[in-house]
Image: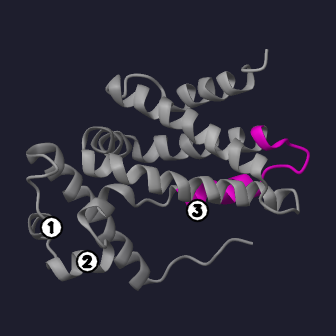
Amino acid sequence: MSSPAPGLREQRKARTRKAIQEHALRLFLADGYDATTVERIASAAGVSHMTFFRYFPSKEAVVENDEYDPMLVELIRAQPAGAGPLTALRNAVVGGIREVYATDKDALLVRTRLILTTPALRGRQWRNAESTQALFAEALATRADGGTTFELRVLAAAVLGALSTALAEWAEGDGADDLPTLMDRAFDALAHLDS
């Protein structure tokens, strides 16, 4: 059973959030991250700076916040029971990135570049990765009807390290490579470490 379509209010909020993020990314590219103020982003998006803060707690959050983690967690949980943890992560993450890549490639590239090249954002990435690691490990544990173990946390951390490397490679190549293919290669590298 599918969830009901969002109401008009939720649709309007989603459009406002997306507009703020799109204008922010455009301004960051044009003028630089540090030179772009919240006030300029809000003005470009046609909202007040208070409205900006209702959607994003900080300027950094405009770059960092996305809906990818919840989507990936659901995809991990939906993997077949017989799939091992690494296979479940691979299928979920590569499949999820294919969806994002098909609809949001340009924004993902801009956001990745900003995170890699802006010290304030790069430093915050560590905390965000810890949160994603915990979500992945918990999703794997749910599939196994058990608790989050040290081994699942290590696997989630290794996968995130591989994915970060694939994202960096993709951004450094100006998005010329196919990101889902790079992520598949990252999983191949993990799978072949023992051979």
Q: Which residues are magenta?
A: 69-86
Q: Amino acid at mark 3?
A: Pro
Q: Which badge, 3 or 1, is on the more N-terminal residue?
A: 1
- Cα separation, mark 2 vs mark 1, equals 9 Å
Question: Counting other residues with Cα less than 10 Å from the Cα at mark 2, is it few (<14), some (14-19), or many (20 or more)?
Answer: some
Which residue corresponds to the image point at 74% horizontal and 25% vertical from the top-left? 191
The amino acid type, in three-letter code, at marker 1 is Val
Tell me: residue 117, above or below residue 71: above
| Residue type, label 2 | Phe
Q: Could you tell me which residue is drawn at 49 percent across and 30 percent down?
A: 165
Residue 169 image point, x, y percent: 42, 25
Residue marked by disc 3: 70
Could you say where residue 52 lies in the image, as x and y percent from the top left?
23, 75
Q: Main secondary structure of the magenta part?
A: helix
Secondary structure beneath dot 1 equals: helix
- Tag 3, which secondary structure? helix
Q: Position of residue 20 (x, y in %)?
A: 24, 65
